[in-house]
Image (cartoon, helix red, strand yellow):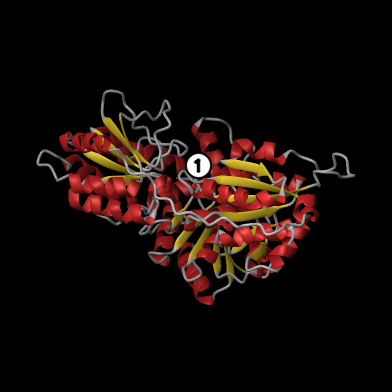
Amino acid sequence: MKAAQLFVKALEAEGVSCIFGVPGEENLDLVEALRESSIRLVVTRHEQGAGFMAATWGRLTGEAGVALSTLGPGATNLVTAAAYAQLGAMPMLMITGQKPIRTHKQGLFQLVDVVDMMQPLTKYTRQLVSAPTIPARVREAFRRAEEERPGAVHLELPEDIARDDVGDAILLPTEYARRPSADDAALVQAAEAISAARHPILMIGAAANRQRTAVALRDFIDKLGIPFFTTQMGKGVVDEDHPLWLGNAALSDGDFVHRAIDAADVIINAGHDVVEKPPFFMRKGRRTVIHINFASAEVDTVYFPQIEVVGDIAHTIERLTDALQPQKHWNFDYFDKVRHAFHEQLQEHADDARFPMHPVRIVADTRRAMPDDGVLCLDNGMYKLWYARYYRARQPNTVLLDNALATMGAGLPSAMAAKMVFPERKVLAICGDGGFMMNAQELETAVRLKLDLVILLLRDDAYGMIRWKQAEMRHADYGMQFGNPDFVMFAEAHGAHGHRPACADEFLPTLQQAYAQGGVHLIDLAIDYADNHRILDEQIRQLSAAV
């Protein structure tokens, strides 16, 4: 047995069923071993797309997704995906090839120190220098990737090591490890602070986006009646049609939810991570912030909680739910007033007939078309703020957006992975024209995989979010616009179906028809961002200030 075959057997022992990547000369032995294995190799058109797919696989399953590349340029193409997984807490293993390390005859051709390059972007990175150590290295890589806080890991398999013969190597069993429980004294301190508060509020962050945690938080809210809001990556942990939902912190300040935050004297912070830009709620001496997470808080100028309850989030919330009772002195009257005003404002423009379409109408029609378990996968752009604020997520992990690295180009690959994980669900990739073109080549991969997938391409012929910021800073409109191909013809050239609604009333039927027909569909939809400044910078701030 070759070392490459042992490596694949170690992957099989970890439960790996699929690898995304672009093969190269230096990992052909590994590719041959995959051919003979139970693992499916999904060949993508760019390593970055493979990395985004692997990271999303890990995000949705909790089990490390796996991406494969060759040495040099293949490995460097994984860098953005590594940062995407690491900052977004998505378990992912990257496997890269390398020249022979004992002897080679090509000088410095394509030679990059990939292990050193990956060091600041991963939890664990190693070059495999001995075949017998492969099972231990693979086991450790998966353990590191999947334990809290999850993230990216990397293994480099040199060409000569991959070809080494191995004897009777022993595969290591996967371990079962329970997350530690929170300290009793910390729980008591948190419970006492919540009980003594007059206006407690709950914030739900990305690390709470686990199934068991979602159930625990719903029980906590239902028993105690404490209002809640979410960060962008906490959307859907608790049904946003819940009567106590106060909104999403899509904007940094000046929204209705920030008026509730200002009025709170205790903020129960379940699963927030400073990697995700927080709302501005730290006001020294004004309130107590309780940090509930798998790990202690990373203190920053924008985040310095007074009470920390460190341990399994779900178990902590369950214990707090048991320990607490609704208090007569709790007063949520102002929160109710904020919620009413917020919900009233959410309805504006939901039926706007203008074309190009208003962002709120697009979000509203998307919600009308998607079932509760339908999955939205958003690329990064101006539309992300509109969806985060206006789209009501009904279930955990049904709005996949990146508010950590916030990279462009991940929307389509992320949606492809989501459809592979949930083949029975409707999945919608939502991309701007800028972000889509950064990984548009993966459209061929989606067609080749015969996915039932719809891509909503929101076209404004510009880098819309940066253009909005440019206008907000009162700079001239410069350097943000570009040309685009005919996206309908582009889709059809790849074997997909292309659509271009000509008015607002055509969008929803087009989206519904695409899902009914099956296959890969791209909807080229013109979007009107003229209200970015008026609504997001002015109207919301003025209306919320009046509450």
Rendered residue at 34%/52% (across/down): 213
Asked whether 178 or 447 is in front, the reply is 178
Residue at the limit of the structure toward the left, as seen here: 328
Q: Which residue is mark 1?
A: 404
Task: Give percent across and percent down for residue 181.
Answer: 33, 44
Task: Give percent across and percent down for residue 313.
Answer: 34, 46
Rendered residue at 64%/59% (across/down): 20
Rendered residue at 51%/69% (across/down): 423
Task: Give percent across and percent down for residue 162.
Answer: 75, 54
309 relative to 2, above or below: above
**Is 483 left, or right, of 521 in this rendering?**
right
The quadrant in which the C terminus is found is: top left
Asked whether 436 or 397 is in front, the reply is 397
Residue at the limit of the structure toward the bottom, as seen here: 517
Residue at the limit of the structure toward the top, as seen here: 285
327 relative to 288, above or below: below
Res. 244 visible in picture: no
Asked whether 130 or 465 is in front, the reply is 130
Q: Amino acid at mark 1?
A: Ala
The quadrant in which the N terminus is found is: bottom right
**Is 481 left, or right, of 206 in this rendering?**
right
How packed mark 1 is, by other alpha carbons closer than 10 Å (few <14, some 14-19, many 20 or more), is many
Res. 386 visible in picture: yes
Which image quadrant is residue 489 in?
Answer: bottom right
**Numbered marks: total:** 1
